[in-house]
Amino acid sequence: MEEEAVGLGHGDEILWKSNIPPLLLLLIPILFSTIFILRSHLKKKNKPTFPLPPGPWKLPIIGNIHQLAAFSAGVPIHRRFADLAEQYGPIMHLKLGETSNVIISSPESAREFLRTHDQNFAARPYLPSADIIFYGSKDIAFCSEGDYWRQMRKILTMELLTDKRVKSFRPILEAEASKLMNLIGSEPGQDIFLAGGDTSPVTVEWAMSELMKNPEKMNKVQREVREMFDKRGKVVDDACFNELHYLKSVVKETFRLHPPVPLSIPREGRETVVINGCQIPAKTRIIVNSWAIGRNSSHWTQPDQFIPERFLNSSIDYKGNDFQLIPFGAGRRMCPGMNYGIFVVYLLLANLLYHFDWKLPNQIKPQDLDMSEDSGGTVPRKNNLYLNSIPYHAP
């Protein structure tokens, strides 16, 4: 191929007239594009790729909602998630609509997300309902991590809900507990029903339910409580709660079987990370199933049985360091109201156990007591617990 210069005269520019075929000129950019695509593909192929966590098959638009709806009616969602986790594993990917979610169902996986990668998963996703109810998600539980959240948490954990501050509420709480006991005692033998909507009453309701279903455990914990407070002038206070080892075990076992919030408020990942060989993309919502963790057969013997004795010689606690038992969560987004909630549970339960003997009405046998769960953020009994109260008279 030859090229020739064509002069346009003195001072004019020189134009090059090419003999290259026009078709070849069109192919040059295609050739360069092909080379670029091949190089990009080779680079991508050489990089390690990780799959999403396993999960059930998904449909366009609705994702996995059809699998959740396919379960029998009335089964709480935390039980549905636990059933699916039995098939797909403790780190399970679900799409609820167009939203990607990862459900955590074992202590080991909870530790990875809530401790090892805690900072990455400390954010909250935008939830329209929380935005409306809590004035732009200003509540400590729903606001995303940032300066506002850090300031709120500092006020709660260092000022309002410290051990010292909670103990300063003791006279008020003990007075209210005394009023409740007087109200129950004013109508002995009548049906008393226990029903809870908040986390502390829900825990007391489940503890009493489990004790009524297991009379030998009820007798054991009442003996401990009454021996202690009979020595102290028949006054139930918090001064010796730490010495009531079996009562503490009853509360822990209740938290294990009936965590007040079985599914954590969703967290959201800031960046894409790889955990246990699975890719967790940014913006994925993380939900911890503490109900499933508390019944994990790899960590608990007879996981569905109420056995407070398992905690008598155990260091496992509910304060966020032992991931087998995390009713209040763990890490940065752990519930800041734990100290207050625990105090209320101990105070109410100790009073009920000390002041009254309890009987099931209508000759219901303990083994026949219905233990069905309701659905919701907190999970109370599906049916209220009705009991007959018999005042206790100390010798």
Image (cartoon, rainbow, N blue to C red):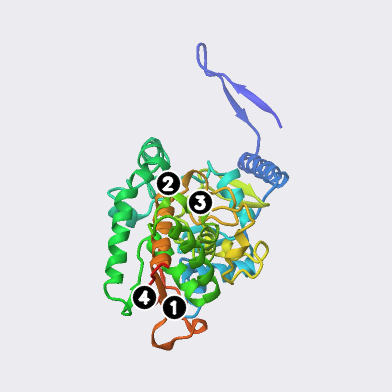
Q: Quadrant of residue 160?
A: top left
Question: Are the residues at dot 4 and dot 3 in contact (C-beta closer than 8 Å)?
Answer: no
Q: Residue furthest front?
A: 395
Q: Which mark is residue 242?
A: 3
Mark 4 and mark 3: Cα distance apart in space: 27 Å
- Residue 214, image x and y in percent? 53, 75
SS of the residue at dot 1?
loop
Q: Which mark is residue 389?
A: 4
State which tag comes first along the sequence, 4 or 3.
Answer: 3
- Residue 317, image x and y in percent? 56, 52
Mark 3 and mark 1: Cα distance apart in space: 39 Å
Mark 2 and mark 3: Cα distance apart in space: 21 Å
- Residue 381, image x and y in percent? 41, 73
Residue 11 visible from this viewpoint: yes
Q: Nearer the viewer, mark 4 or mark 2?
A: 4
Residue denoted by label 1: 74
Q: Nearer the viewer, mark 1 or mark 2?
A: 2
Q: Residues within 10 Å of mark 1 (few under 14, many from 20)?
A: few
Q: Quadrant of residue 82?
A: bottom right
Q: Amino acid at mark 4?
A: Ser
Residue denoted by label 2: 336
SS of the residue at dot 2?
loop
Q: Taking 301 as reference, is 146 left or right?
A: left
Q: Residue furthest top?
A: 10
Mark 4 and mark 2: Cα distance apart in space: 35 Å
Q: Residues within 10 Å of mark 4 (few under 14, many from 20)?
A: many
Q: Taking 79 as reference, is 153 left or right?
A: left
Q: Nearer the viewer, mark 3 or mark 1?
A: 3
